[in-house]
Amino acid sequence: VSAVHAGDPNRVADLPIEGGEAPGRGRGGPAPVRIVVGYGFWIFILSDMVMFSAFFAAYAVLADATAGGPAGKQIFDLGNVAVETACLLASSFACGLASLAAGARRQLWFHLAMAATFVLGAGFLGLELKEFADLAAKGDGPQRSAFLSAFFTLVGCHGAHITAGLLWLLTMMAQVVAKGFRADILRRILCFTLFWHALDIIWVAIFTMVYLIGAGR
Amino acid sequence: MKLLGNLDWSAIPLDQPIPMAASGVVALGITAVLGWVVLTGRLPYLWREWITSVDHKRIGVMYCLLALVMLLRGFSDAIMMRSQQAFALNSGGYLPPEHYDQVFSAHGTIMIFFVAMPFLIGLMNFVLPLQLGVRDVAFPTLNSVSFWLTATGALLVNISLVIGEFARTGWLPYPPLSELRYSPGVGVDYYLWALQISGVGTLLTGINFVTTILKLRAPGMGYLRMPMFCWTALASNLLIVAAFPILTATLAMLILDRYLGFHFFTNEAGGNMMMFVNLIWAWGHPEVYILILPAFGVFSEVVSTFSAKPLFGYRSMVIATMAICLLSFMVWLHHFFTMGAGADVNAFFGVMSMIIAVPTGVKVFNWLFTIYGGRVRFTAPMLWAIGFMITFVIGGMTGVLLAVPPADFVLHNSLFLVAHFHNVIIGGVLFGAFAGYAYWFPKAFGFRLHEGLGQAAFWCWFVGFYIAFMPLYVLGLMGMTRRLQHYDVPEWRPWTWIAMAGAVVILIGICCQIAQLVVSIRRRESLRDVTGDPWDGRSLEWSTASPPPEFNFAVLPDVHGEDAYWNMKQRALDEAAAEPAYEAIEMPRNSPTGFVCAFFATVMGFALIWHIWWLAIAGLLGAWATFVVFAWRDHTEREIPADEVARIDRANLASRRGAPREAVT
């Protein structure tokens, strides 16, 4: 009977994960909210990766369908991509610092780290948009060939995620200012950091499969 | 820039009597219902208790209601097609081709996405937390968002009836037909945005339920103690999580082709239309199992309960379910053997398709052995289950036949195929949904459905199905292709008449179901379920009251084995246990987030269909703002005091023990 109330799924209390009675594996009853939220968000990230994999598959099928237009080799600027990658990885590092600051309940450090994350993420996005705009200006926009359609969609989908992430980031900063490090806010910060790091993983795949392999062919 | 994009008065088909009359009737019906709700002062109740509810039981009921209403719409399309083909020998029939094409496209789209899916998701919503012995799903507000986004999709499809048109491409919009050049109207756009929006809802449901099943279970409810319905729901929702993003991506590519001139699937500039067919079936085949697996779960519960025996071969059933879950991703190419992938590829997918029939066969034998030696009660849910077993085996065998590539080359795109998939979807998914509807109805509402009318509905559906679809097998073998608006082969005509007659018998079945609902509501006092356990059930949902209190269980049950509630009854724990220490329960507050968000999604979808860009942006911003407002709430939960919990639970226990309620308080 003692285990009965331990894992009320609807309790907001920020239960410790370590040594919790309820791992959610069927012994101690429902898992604490923090585990449930993180777990659910992991499942969402998995589904997002499946969506990306469909765009990757489309890119792989259409990579050679240049229809007389440019191939990857002619349009990819690895220098630009290197700077983009550096921005994104550095922003992920800053995001990690932000979650440490949130764990330590340090408002100032949290906002500084989140601001750094934002600036680096926005820098990445700016470089990507510039790449897109330059290509479109040269007549090599997504309407030019199936290859370019797939390229713009795959890379642009990642960029759209980054944009949504930046919007989310600002919302989280505003929430921390308004509400402080409340349990539900901390759970959202956890989800945001998972999201932001997952976009890095996607970017590593894009960097390799699109830019490195494309420029080398 | 035009303020209303491409929308003007020509979008309303004033010259076509059928859609105008149909939408007129629907509009009258909606106005009548809304007027009744408002005039009788029930609007605040509806808003408070249903529209903003985040209770999984209420959301489940709303899902099922949506499915039943859309079933009527989808069935009207079906009977129009059957009558058109019965009359259209050497003549145009009464449906012009452009209308007939919309009818069969809408029929498929509605039946899969807005009948089968919401029906099963509704059942899972209602049943899963009860069977797992917990108080709600993992993310209650998200659950409400899912439902309302699904309703948005259904609404958009129905708006297309009166404003503009629906797709003429079939239920899967194969390019290049669905590309802008060959489908310049808004029909395909209605399809795309309706499915994108409801697809988001389905994906969120999948995430929600996977998390619920894996992380929220009553103490002691280990994986191998979960009822079979929970297992099949787990497999189904894992498939949703893994497959629906592919649909989203594929439809997004088609949207980019149509809206921004991309070249994913076009004839020009290197586009590859076969990639669409591959991608859509990489989602589409798992989708088949997303639908059938929860139905398998329903049958497992029903067969076990009404045979008064534990499910035979529980563990082999679990393995079979998870095997189907995996294998369902390895057979998609059998939907287009004729693509020309070559003999080796076709042989691989043909063999895989036959292999996936093995775990399904395991399940059929398990159900049969569960019945064997049991004390069988032939109630309506059990009749649906037995009807399913016979029908589904026939459908499965024609499926194995179609999995043989050389046979498929002859039969593909014919009415044989149409007969096959109706054989498994009606005989499997729909019968399963109806079995679950009859089985869990008393749990949801506290009174049983009228048994006689339920059995009459079953027999009409069962017999009607055979009369309607067996002729289609024959027609397929005679060479009749699917989706024919008219034809000139006199030999086909008698069979189309028989099929038409079958559709009428099914119509009588549907009338029986409507009558059953009306009669049951009117006679609810005599059909009242006071014990909470009307069928002598085995799993935890029967251990609580009918209808269950908002918090499901006053005290979370403690599980000691399979068939948790059966064990409790055997050991008389329920009766003998001392009164538990009641504690206050925190439940999530209701929230209009789902409804408001779906409102903005509807606005956005409609605006995108008609290229009203400012409105689309406004809709998107509105949806985002809704979530920010939701995230800003300070009070997310509401406490039900221990006294209140105790009062409700004591009343329930008293009712269950057959004692008068007053005596115990």
Image: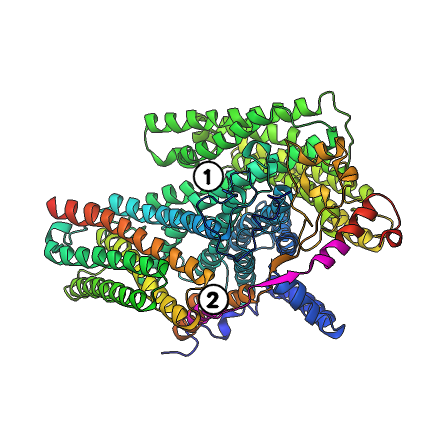
At 24% from the left edge and 65% from the top edge, which residue is drawn? A116
Residue type, numbered disc 2: Ala
Task: Give the tally of numbered discs.
Answer: 2
Q: Is residue B231 visible?
A: yes
Residue tagged 2: B631
Between residues B495 and B176, which one lies in front from this camera angle? B176
Task: Tell me which chain the residue with mark 1 is part of.
Answer: B
Report x, y in % for residue B536. Answer: 77, 36
Quadrant location, the N terminus of chain B: bottom left
- Which quarter of the picture shows residue A128? bottom left
Q: Is residue B637 magenta?
A: yes
Between residues B453 and B644, which one lies in front from this camera angle? B644
**What coloring was used for the rendering?**
rainbow
Task: Tell me which chain the residue with mark 2 is part of.
Answer: B
Q: Is residue A204 magenta?
A: no
- Which quarter of the picture shows residue B309? top right
Report x, y in % for residue B524. Answer: 83, 52
**B425 w.r.t. B367: above or below:** below
Residue tagged 1: B285
**A162 w.r.t. B176: above or below:** below
Helix, strand or loop at label 2? It is: helix
At 40% from the left edge and 75% from the top edge, which residue is drawn? B614
10 Å crowding of disc 1: few (<14), some (14-19), many (20+): some
Q: Main secondary structure of the magenta part?
A: helix
Helix, strand or loop at label 1? It is: helix
**A109 w.r.t. B94: above or below:** below
User: Magenta stretch?
Assistant: B621-647
Q: Nearer the viewer, mark 2 or mark 1?
A: 2
Residue type, numbered disc 1: His
Report x, y in % for residue B327. Answer: 44, 31
Report x, y in % for residue B148. Answer: 55, 60
Earlier sequence position, callout 2 versus callout 1: 1
